[in-house]
Amino acid sequence: MTKKLTGTQIRQSFIDFFVERHHTFVPSTSLVPGGDATLLFTNAGMVQFKDVFLGTDKRPYTRAVDSQKVLRVAGKHNDLDEVGRDDTHHTFFEMLGNWSFGDYYKKEALAWSWELLTDVWGLPRDRLYATCFKDDQGNIPTDEEAAETWKQQPGMDPTHILFFGRKENFWEMAETGPCGPCSEIHLDRGEEYDNLAGKPHQCGVNGECQRYLELWNNVFIQYNRLDKDTLEPLPAKHVDTGMGFERIVSVIQGVDSDYKIDLFSGALDAIRSLTGDSLEKMYADFTPYRVIADHGRAAAFLIADGVVPGNVGRNYICRMIIRRAARFGTKLGLHDPFLAKVADAVISAYGDFYPELVKSREIIVDNLTREEIRFARTVESGTAYLEQLLEELRKSNQQVLDGRKVFDLYATYGLPFEICRDIAREQNLEVDETGFHLAMDEHRIASGGGKAMGKMGGEDAEFYAKELKDLQQAGALGESGVEYNPYKWLRTKGPLLALAENGRLLTDAGAGDRVEVLLPKTGFYVESGGQVSDTGVIRAADNSWEIEVDDMRKPSAGVIIHVGEVVFGHPKAGQMAVAEVDAVRRHDIRRNHTATHLLHAALHKVLGDKARQAGSLVTPDRFRFDFNHPEAMTPEQVERVEKLVNEAVAADLPVRAVSKSRDQAVAEGAMALFGEKYGDIVRTITIGGDYSYELCGGTHLDRTSDVGTFIIVSEGSAAAGIRRIEAVTGRAAYDLISRRGKSLKLTAAALKSSLEEIPQKTRLIQEELAAARKQLASLKADVALAGFMTSLQNPQMIEDVSLVVVELPGVDKEALGKLADKFREKYPQKGICVIGSITGEGQIIIMAAVTQDLIKRGIKAGDLVGFISSQLGAGGGGAPHLAFGGGREAEKIPEALAGTKEWVGKKLK
Ligand SMILES: [Zn+2]
Ligand SMILES: [Zn+2]
């Protein structure tokens, strides 16, 4: 606390400290975990190293240091409830960590953490505490090694070395798998931080008050848990440490809140510049400020990682936190979009270390503002409706609002569940979360988006991880598991290593059985990067059985599974098998995949670099490509893009795949995609000299000319701010052209024209048609007028009143008005005229006109029309001298009109 370092300097000093101790700096991975569909967001530093601990992945280094972006807003780790209410919780935060993969262990790790905290950062030694593991159940040995190490640290008070049990000091990844004791470092911040001072409470490390703060956790992974009672020592021991970045910065900068560190001050200043609040006023009502600063930061990082606001999954979370921030803004009197200003402050505070923020600035600002505007349109009616629901709840003496109703609020007014819960809780009521998620799932399944989370991982991951280990021990599989090379092999031969079904091994299978097949190597592509899996056949080398493969899976690292159905015979584990990819289908897929890269490059040329890929689906028949763009493309833009791609196809550009280090590829400007997991060695695809350069694991053509033809089938909206292009190539493009050609030929034949003359001929026919329609309308009007004039000559007489009732087809309201004038010319007084008509559009109109003198005698046009229209199943009315009505039952018009005479007769009496 002696040195005033900025947050950025503190992060860098952590990294430098460990790099000097031969650690490799590993950049933070995306908030969207690559290749792990079981996880919505990266929620811990170890996510990107999980496979290393499980022993299914290897890295070129054994020591690593990182600052990992983490989001805890969904699933098991959800801190949303606490954010804003206190000074230590965040949805988004950074986790500092140093890692040893079978390299150094407790002595080094603990000594270094002590050295960094005390020597480098100057924390007072006498205020630091260390905790070590001592099993409260008495089964696992006490971690004496850690305790001994602590005793040797210079200035460490031996009475500050404490022991705790499994809850505090033993870490497990899952019910089985890697685990081990941990050792935490805590700081006594002094009595002034004791929020429970004066009350009797457990005051100390892992106690009840806020005086003692956990700073750093060192996890020592030394066991493999086989079952509830059995731990087996690991041959390679690992170190996994984690230190909440915001917390250590607050300690070093000597502030009493994570939100008072320098990295937040820009965002808070930006909000204050809008509210006009002083620092004191802000601190007095800090909650809305904390929520906005936290959510604004999280949203900026999310959007930079490709997660834009939307309705489902990750996109819903992004939408929810933006809307929640906006609502807290209204509490501060902010009603116009303001989050762009917060995001700008976040970008300047974090942009140097996280360049993706700077690169995506426009996309971030644009998405935030548009989401705020969208929300502003519905928030008032939504909250008003919610208030009404809560009022009803109170009246019926209930506490919990039905989740289904909360979902309706979201579906109709865009009011996210979390905001409804905020509002309900402000009134000491609750909302039913389970019901909300049920309703949301039902809705999602009904709208066809159920499989949004993919199919990696799953329940049999452990079964296959164990199977892999067994096969490796038996020497049937090498260290990296199944050999996978979809780029080289369309046909492989090898023994059928395992035959399985629903997470259990089969000794054999018969025709019609669905099975999963494990082979020592395969060329079948496994769905990734938007490209679908290959299909094909696996058959016995002696042709005694055959399995039709229709899907591929990677249940855990190193394991690749062929999924299919036995067509005939009885496959058994151990038999020699030949696996063959459906090469024709694969070739169609290659065409489409190479075309997505050409399309991506063409979009950049036409729309600019911001038109970044946001997702894709590459199948044999067609492909779909999503990209960031705020508005619909014009037809000219679509045409230009299509032309550019076809020019690149015709240019017969070479497509080259080269593997290199990720850092080099990114430095060379290769486009990396969000949500993809990239190792340290990446595969790059270059088209032409520099036409397109992307990181990609897909299968591609050798030359672009093999695409054949590229045709855009549609351009439309995929989500807010995201456009989607669907396109075809090769055989599918030929089919499309051929189909379109046929309908053109049919059209030409019907028009009696050549193909080239179709547009001109069509225009001509349209003009002729328009002229004919006009003529017809004028003829109809003439006929109607003539008929009407005849009727005018022959009125029915009721006492001294002339009544003209006539049905005229095809006369619209405007023309009826003119006929009324003709009537008045002929009968300036003592006249009534009623016309019923069905217009060209099939609409029934009843008109009545009455001369002034008769109004005094009780005959009103409005009443008359009402009388007639009511018999036709509709209503009508208007002024006493002129009124119009409608009707639904055309067949009753004659009868209804015939009743006029009697109606008038009665009125005159
Ligand atoms: Zn206390
Ligand atoms: Zn690709």
Image (cartoon, grey):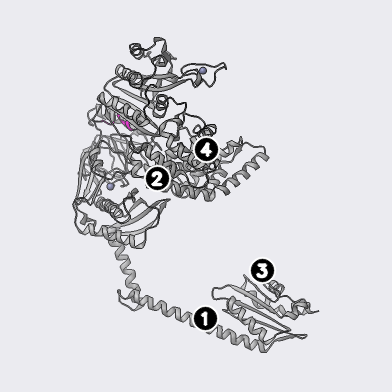
Q: Callout 2, which amino acid?
A: Ile
The magenta stretch spans residue 53:
yes
Q: Quadrant of the C terminus?
A: bottom right
Q: Earlier in the sequence, mark 4 or mark 3?
A: 4
Residue 156 appears left or right of 833? left
The residue under label 3 is 875
Q: CA distance from mark 3 to mark 1?
A: 27 Å
Q: Callout 1, which amino acid?
A: Ala
Residue found at x 23% / y 41%: 665
Q: Nearer the viewer, mark 2 or mark 4?
A: 4
Q: Residues within 10 Å of mark 3 (few under 14, many from 20)?
A: some
Image coordinates of residue 807 in percent, x first then y, are: 63, 80
User: Label for residue 777?
Assistant: 1
Q: Callout 3, which amino acid?
A: Gly
Q: Earlier in the sequence, mark 3 or mark 1?
A: 1
Q: Is residue 863 visible?
A: yes
Q: CA distance from mark 2 to mark 4?
A: 26 Å
Q: Callout 4, which amino acid?
A: Asp
Q: Residue furthest right?
A: 909
